[in-house]
Amino acid sequence: MGHSTRHANTHELTPARGSIRNTVVTAAYAAAGRAGPVTTADLREGAEREYRKAGRLVPGEGNW
Protein backbone atom coordinates (compact mmCIF):
# COMPACT_ATOMS: atom_id res chain seq x y z
CA MET A 1 0.00 0.00 0.00
CA GLY A 2 1.15 3.50 -0.70
CA HIS A 3 2.05 6.21 1.74
CA SER A 4 -1.36 7.80 1.19
CA THR A 5 -3.06 4.96 3.04
CA ARG A 6 -4.05 5.95 6.56
CA HIS A 7 -4.95 3.35 9.16
CA ALA A 8 -6.91 5.66 11.45
CA ASN A 9 -10.31 5.15 9.85
CA THR A 10 -9.99 1.56 8.69
CA HIS A 11 -10.62 0.22 12.21
CA GLU A 12 -14.18 1.54 11.98
CA LEU A 13 -15.06 -1.16 9.47
CA THR A 14 -15.65 -4.70 10.67
CA PRO A 15 -16.31 -6.87 7.63
CA ALA A 16 -16.55 -10.64 7.76
CA ARG A 17 -13.29 -12.50 7.16
CA GLY A 18 -14.06 -13.44 3.58
CA SER A 19 -15.00 -9.88 2.79
CA ILE A 20 -11.62 -8.56 3.92
CA ARG A 21 -9.88 -10.35 1.06
CA ASN A 22 -12.48 -9.14 -1.43
CA THR A 23 -12.10 -5.58 -0.12
CA VAL A 24 -8.34 -5.66 -0.68
CA VAL A 25 -8.64 -7.28 -4.11
CA THR A 26 -11.17 -4.64 -5.19
CA ALA A 27 -8.83 -1.89 -3.96
CA ALA A 28 -5.87 -3.45 -5.76
CA TYR A 29 -7.76 -3.62 -9.05
CA ALA A 30 -8.80 0.02 -8.70
CA ALA A 31 -5.19 1.05 -8.09
CA ALA A 32 -3.90 -1.08 -10.96
CA GLY A 33 -6.51 0.42 -13.27
CA ARG A 34 -4.98 3.84 -12.77
CA ALA A 35 -1.39 2.53 -12.43
CA GLY A 36 -1.03 3.90 -8.91
CA PRO A 37 -0.72 2.75 -5.32
CA VAL A 38 -3.64 1.48 -3.26
CA THR A 39 -5.13 4.41 -1.38
CA THR A 40 -7.46 4.78 1.56
CA ALA A 41 -10.19 5.76 -0.90
CA ASP A 42 -9.67 2.46 -2.75
CA LEU A 43 -9.98 0.49 0.49
CA ARG A 44 -13.08 2.42 1.51
CA GLU A 45 -14.72 1.80 -1.84
CA GLY A 46 -13.88 -1.89 -1.60
CA ALA A 47 -15.29 -2.09 1.92
CA GLU A 48 -18.44 -0.21 0.95
CA ARG A 49 -18.94 -2.57 -1.97
CA GLU A 50 -18.61 -5.61 0.31
CA TYR A 51 -21.09 -4.18 2.82
CA ARG A 52 -23.61 -3.53 0.05
CA LYS A 53 -23.13 -7.01 -1.47
CA ALA A 54 -23.90 -8.46 1.96
CA GLY A 55 -27.03 -6.30 2.22
CA ARG A 56 -25.62 -4.37 5.16
CA LEU A 57 -25.64 -0.66 5.84
CA VAL A 58 -22.31 1.05 5.31
CA PRO A 59 -21.02 2.35 8.67
CA GLY A 60 -20.75 6.12 8.79
CA GLU A 61 -21.85 6.54 5.19
CA GLY A 62 -21.31 10.12 4.19
CA ASN A 63 -18.86 10.71 7.02
CA TRP A 64 -15.73 9.38 5.34
Image (spheres, grey):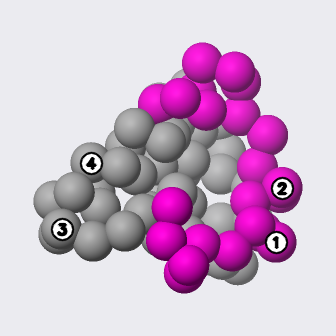
Nearer the observer: mark 3 or 4; the answer is: 3
SS category of the residue bearing label 2: helix
- Classify mark 2: residues with Cα within 10 Å, few (<14), some (14-19) or many (20+): few
4 in relation to 61, above or below: below
Q: Quadrant of residue 12?
A: bottom right
20 in relation to 35, above or below: above
Q: Pick the residue in front: 14 or 32.
A: 32
Amino acid at circle 4: Tyr
State the extent of the magenta-drawn residues as a range: 1-22
**Disc 4 target residue:** 29
Q: Residue at x 40, y 52 (%)?
A: 27
Is residue 42 toward the left or the right of residue 6 in the image? left
**Disc 2 target residue:** 11
Q: Residue at x 59, y 72 (%)?
A: 5
Amino acid at circle 3: Ala
The residues tagged by marks 4 and 2 sit, at their Cα atoms, a distance apart of: 22 Å
* For marks 3 and 4 on the same chain, the one whose residue lies earlier in the sequence: 4
Amino acid at circle 1: Ala
Q: Residue 47: x, y in percent?
A: 56, 47
- Classify mark 1: residues with Cα within 10 Å, few (<14), some (14-19) or many (20+): few
